[in-house]
Image: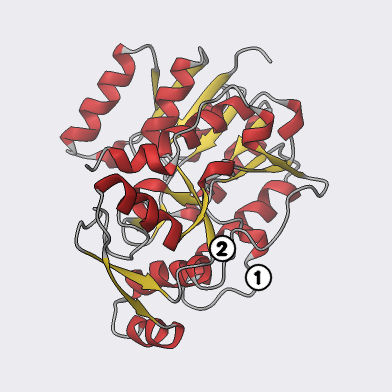
């Protein structure tokens, strides 16, 4: 499928830094947007310099400077945006409309991958407030992309393992307890967990693949389609101990959300749809405009939930 010239926007972020690493590993000519808004964040500056040492090219650009975005996208074939859409970090999804405008003006970009990487927003039309804002904003960006005639790939990567697997699918926890666990409901609805480095590698494999052009790419590693109870069971087997279990009902969970601030309510709404309703697995892939990553790229040896949990022992 050849090599591409790739611009990564949000390259110092949680997923962005992994996209840069995967792009370089696959031999793509990799550009990373360097925004002056980074200020005196020394860790991000040092990360950018490390990317440069590894062969990436740093490109100045800002969402507040339209021409700088146009100049940046003119350098490449593919633009990938990984700015945050997670409210507990920051929510900047609609900033991508400025990137869409720049891509339209530049006229040379062969593929745009906007910041999605989670639940497919096109399937979340009935999502609850306040969490639905994430999906609504992503659909606004999709509409602008498609009305602008921009070629795209949307990546639905489901649950980031770092947020879900590490905490045994418990909101607010990222480390697994060796003593107890709170099950959301009966813990049986299935979800899909993907190592963040694997998300990046599947994404970079797709950027020049004609099979993913103007389609949604779902990342569904078969061994990682598991319920919360199954994730807990894997952990119990690894540590050789059964955890003390309690549970929180659907009604209790929704009631407890009201006590939280707005950003936390948004995140908890997403947990509700995933862990109580099974929104990630209540449909089949196979319609026109849909592909599944582990089937397209079987050469990628993805990290299983068991392998991911071993690092915590």
| Rendered position, 158 above or below 45 | below
User: How packed is label 1: few (under 14 Cα within 10 Å), some, or many (20 or more)?
Assistant: few
Residue positioned 29% across, 12% down in the render: 53
Q: Are marks 2 and 1 in contact (CB under 8 Å)?
A: yes
Q: Quadrant of the N terminus?
A: top right
Residue extending farthest right: 288
Residue positioned 66% across, 32% down in the render: 111
Residue positioned 43% across, 39% down in the render: 195
Q: Decide if residue 235 is in sight here.
A: yes
Q: CA distance from mark 2 to mark 1?
A: 8 Å
| Rendered position, 133 above or below 147 | below
Asked whether 284 or 128 is in front, the reply is: 284
Which badge, 2 or 1, comes first in the chain's sequence?
1
Residue positioned 24% across, 34% down in the render: 44
Q: Is residue 256 left or right of residue 241?
A: right
Q: Quadrant of residue 50?
A: top left
Label of residue 174 in the image: none
Q: Is residue 105 left or right of residue 90?
A: right
Q: Position of residue 232 (x, y in %)?
A: 36, 57
Q: How many marks?
A: 2
Where is mark 1, residue-wise? 125
User: Does dot 2 land on a helix, a strand or a loop?
Assistant: helix
Q: Position of residue 24 (x, y in %)?
A: 44, 17
User: How packed is label 2: few (under 14 Cα within 10 Å), some, or many (20 or more)?
Assistant: many
Q: Is residue 103 left or right of residue 14?
A: right
Q: Position of residue 12 (x, y in %)?
A: 33, 35
Asked whether 237 or 224 is in front, the reply is: 237
User: Does dot 1 land on a helix, a strand or a loop?
Assistant: loop
Label of residue 135 in the image: 2
């Amino acid at each position: 499928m050849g090599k591409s010239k790739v611009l990564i926007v949000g390259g110092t972020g949680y997923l962005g830094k992994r996209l840069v690493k995967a792009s370089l590993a696959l031999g793509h000519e990799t550009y990373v947007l360097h925004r002056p808004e980074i200020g005196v964040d020394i860790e991000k500056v040092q990360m950018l310099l490390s990317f440069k040492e590894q062969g990436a090219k740093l490109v100045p650009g800002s969402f507040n400077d339209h021409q700088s975005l146009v100049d940046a996208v003119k350098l490449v074939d593919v633009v990938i945006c990984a700015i945050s859409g997670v409210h507990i970090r920051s929510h900047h999804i609609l900033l991508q409309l400025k990137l869409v405008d720049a891509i339209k003006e530049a006229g040379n970009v062969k593929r745009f991958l906007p910041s999605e990487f989670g639940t497919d927003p096109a399937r979340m039309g009935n999502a609850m407030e306040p969490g639905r804002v994430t999906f609504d904003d992503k659909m606004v960006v999709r509409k602008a992309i498609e009305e602008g005639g921009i070629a795209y790939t949307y990546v639905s990567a489901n649950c980031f393992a770092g947020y879900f697997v590490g905490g045994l699918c418990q909101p607010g926890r990222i480390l697994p307890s060796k003593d107890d666990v709170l099950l959301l409901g009966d813990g049986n609805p299935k979800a899909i967990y993907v190592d963040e480095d694997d998300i990046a590698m599947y994404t970079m494999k797709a950027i020049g693949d004609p099979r993913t052009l103007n389609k949604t790419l779902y990342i569904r590693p078969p061994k990682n389609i598991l319920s919360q109870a199954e994730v807990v069971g894997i952990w119990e087997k690894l540590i050789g101990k059964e955890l003390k279990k309690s549970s929180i009902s659907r009604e209790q969970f929704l009631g407890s959300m009201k006590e939280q601030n707005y950003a936390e309510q948004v995140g908890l709404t997403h947990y509700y749809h995933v862990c109580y309703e099974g929104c990630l697995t209540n449909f089949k892939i196979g319609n026109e405009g849909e592909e599944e990553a582990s089937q397209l790229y079987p050469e990628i040896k993805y990290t299983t939930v068991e392998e991911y949990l071993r690092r915590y022992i």
